[in-house]
Image (cartoon, rainbow, N blue to C red):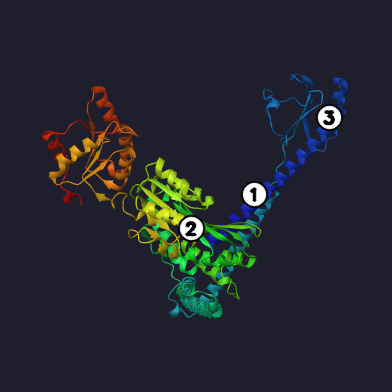
Amino acid sequence: MLKPKLLIALVTALLMAALAACWLQYQLHAKNQQLQLGRVAEHLSDHLIADPVDAAELMTFARENSPVGLLSLELLDANGKQLVFVGEPVQNSSISVRDVEQQSPTLWHQSLNDGRLLVIRATDVPVSYIWIYGLLAAALTIWLGSKLMQRRLERFYSQIWQSIPEPHRKQDPAAAEINRLSLAVRQLAKQQDEAAHQATLNLQIMQSQQKLHVEQQTEIRQQLSQSELKTLQLGRDLQCWHSLAGQAPQLQHAELAFWLAMLNRKQQQTTTPNLTLQGIPQWFAQAIRTLQPMWPAGILLLPDEDPDASRYQAEMDGQLMQQLLHSLLLAVKPLIDGKELLVSYRLYSGARDKLQLKIQYTGKSLSARSRQVLAQGGLAEPHWEDIPFEVCFGLMQQLSAEFQIQELADLGTRLDLSIRISGQQPLSNRRFQNLVIYDPRPCRLDLWRHSLLGVSEQVVATKSITELKAALTSRLIDTVVVHWNYEDMPDNELAELQHISGRYQLILFAPAGLQQRFGTQPPGTQFISPLLLADLQDLPQPGSQFSSQQLLIVDDNPTNLSFVRAMLSGQGISIDFATTGHEALKLASHSRYQLILMDIQLPDLSGIEVTKRIRQLRHHQQTVILAFTGHALPEEAVSFRLAGMDDVMIKPLDARKIAHIMSRIRPLAETQ
């Protein structure tokens, strides 16, 4: 027996199914009627002619023989005027068929080639209610069957009730049966719920155990993979150590110690960078100087330094970058055929600051195997030639460096490294004002001139002793830098340079043997070649090594000099004398004075020109210079001050003028 709710749900479902069937059947009929209208319109459009009478006959024939019921056919001209009408009158004719954009099962319009319009109206598509009738019949059958089964059950329960003795009849048999059934259903539902809950718990336990088992298997696989990788790595490391041991007799002691340190570091696999703030030229100089014991003496490491970067500090892992530069240089060392290797750096600022290192040499190109190691890391069977490039690959990974190779087959190769840095901070200004560089190789002069602009305001490049002496004569030079990368130097040039070192601050970059021949110089002014900016940056300011004098008197008249010497001899001050402008310039270049008495009329240069040149020397920017002349008109005094003189003192000296000079001079002990 079906319950009422179930019966209602069943009837509702059947009703929805019947409605859906009716709607689908209606859609099929509508689509079929629309296709038929289209075919009729297409046939008529092919046969209609301009004569309205013949058109009416065709339209009448089409209406009578159409497979669908047509209400009317209408032919309109291009302006919408009716030409022919066949069929039943049209209601609601105010609606223009030209406004209808889509065809429908009851209305079809077809444009002819001459601009006329054919309009066909059909009867509505019939709706079939057979499904609804069938549904009602089925629902009635189900309801009647349910009622019949209910009556049979009631009769069956009544017969059982009548068979029970009278005293035992305590309740209605139908109610008792319903109670028993309800209790049984509740017990079954409870048992089902308990079974479902237990099944869920068992499933969760099984899933947890399965997950734990999968995790254990995954962990075991990972451990096995790590063990295998470690075993393979240890095997490769052992091969690397064997390769290094086989190569040890051909390596210098310093290079062997370096590769030992690199292989040890490679096994430690340190990834945390150690960022420190340091000057870029200082880092570069330290890298080159520590590489020199491992580098062949026949190949010059030629540095090309960025003059802008020389005035900045940056945060970087200097040790890691130094190891990368050493590894790369030592890796390409066997490929070099020339006598020089160019190492340059440039600092680029932007969204991310970076330091670009460039290594350029003449010789063999990198092999395809070496390129693969640099791009992907170590190979399964390492050779000794692979180890330096494998070390480079690991260091580039730690520094996040970008690497490029540009080369012309077996003629020249350039390696570019870009390393990110941060925290640029400006250092002090340039240390020198006027610097001259002497190198007998003219091809290096442009490189030195460009690099030395990082430490000097002006740089003069000379390729011979003659040019050097001419530059010292024509310019105010505060420092002379000599780069000589040969063990031998002609005796005459050596003597000239020794003479120049007695008059100027001379910095020598040369091999150790030539430094010994050159003789004793002030400490810190001789360095092993090549020339590095950091060595110059650590030098004292020009003039700080000169003697501290108090007074310079420039006058070409011996009588005036003798008189001034007599007047000031008892004052306890240090005095220098000069009789020409060039002599005054030479003394001013090598000494610091507190006060200069400058005669205007000199035999070679005017006192005004000498004053201008002295003011160009950094250690005489604050020196007091007095015009020492026999007369001075107001306009002349103005020109003296424009040239750099502080005041005018009229000859001859007297007690008041001497007191004025002494007030401008500090005791000698305070200047030392």
Estimate the x, y position of residue 273 in percent, counting from the top left: 41, 64
Label 1 packing within 10 angstroms: few (<14), some (14-19), many (20+): some
Circles 3 and 1, Cβ within 8 Å, touching? The answer is no
Tell which tag, 3 or 2, sits nearer the viewer. Answer: 2
Of residues 653 and 268, the one nearer the viewer is 653
* Residue assigned mark 1: 19
Q: Amino acid at mark 3?
A: Ser
Label 3 packing within 10 angstroms: few (<14), some (14-19), many (20+): some
User: From the viewer's perspective, is 81 left or right of 448?
Assistant: right
- Residue 318 occupies quadrant: bottom left
Alpha carbon distance from label 3 to label 1: 39 Å
Q: Is residue 62 depicted above or below 165 in this figure? A: above
User: From the viewer's perspective, is 319 left or right of 94?
Assistant: left
* Residue assigned mark 3: 45
Q: Amino acid at mark 1?
A: Leu
Alpha carbon distance from label 3 to label 2: 115 Å
* Residue assigned mark 2: 490
**SS for callout 3:** helix
Q: Is residue 344 depicted above or below 231 in this figure? A: above
